[in-house]
Amino acid sequence: GNRCGRIAIYQGAFGTLLAGTTGDGTNDLLGYSMAMAPSTTGTRGGCVAAGAPELATHGVSAGAGYVRAYRYLTGQVTGLMTLATWQAYAAGSKFGLSIAAAGDVDDDGGTDFLIAAPGSSLVAGAVELRSGRTDQVLWRRTDTASNHAFGRGLAAASVLGGATTSAIIGVPLADLQC
């Protein structure tokens, strides 16, 4: 197969298929990572971000990767609407390998997402926080070296009584003194 990848949204106790979509091309692997958040505007549905890290497979070199954000709708009208496609900063970075919903960090009414590009032996990893409403990069943190898998694990949590959202970034291959 062409390994373009697919995401599908199922609902309720009966697993009713609401919507689905596929990646753009060969080895995209759309759906490798996903994060879902309820609507911040009170409508039925919410926001989904799906990673397509374009990993190297079967002799095909790795691409840069991308993340696609969708609005999903439930109720009488169901489906997916593409909101944005966020592109990687470097080939081989594996952008979209990990994703986490971070809530509305910038208070603009949209769900924001942490997106990792763990990198490779040639490209240092990075994690960025993207605004789900404006598509802007709110911040980016980059690893000090390549091949550490910076951001392979991601989580976001509200701390200090919910006033602040913190990003938790896993770096499983960091070569530090233990």
Image: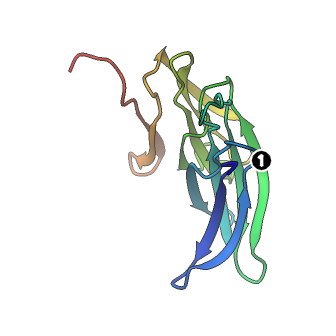
Residue placed under numbered mark 1 in the picture: 24
**Where is residue 79, by image quadrant?**
bottom right
Residue at position x 77%, y 47% from top? 24
Q: Relative to residue 169, is residue 105 depicted above or below?
A: below
Q: Does 141 appear above or below 169?
A: above
Please give the name of the residue rendered at 58% of the width and 58% of the height, measured from the top-left corner.
36
Q: Secondary structure at mark 1?
A: loop
Q: Residue furthest left?
A: 178
- Horizontal side of 158 relative to 114 (left or right) equals left
Which residue appears at 50% of the width and 18% of the height?
121
Which x, y percent locates residue 14? 54, 85
Residue 20 in view (yes/no): yes
Near-viewer residue (137 or 32): 32
Q: Is residue 71 left or right of residue 172?
A: right
Q: Picture coordinates of residue 49 (x, y %)?
A: 64, 51
**Quarter-of-image position of residue 53:** top right
Q: Amino acid at mark 1?
A: Asp
The quadrant of the picture occupied by the C terminus is top left
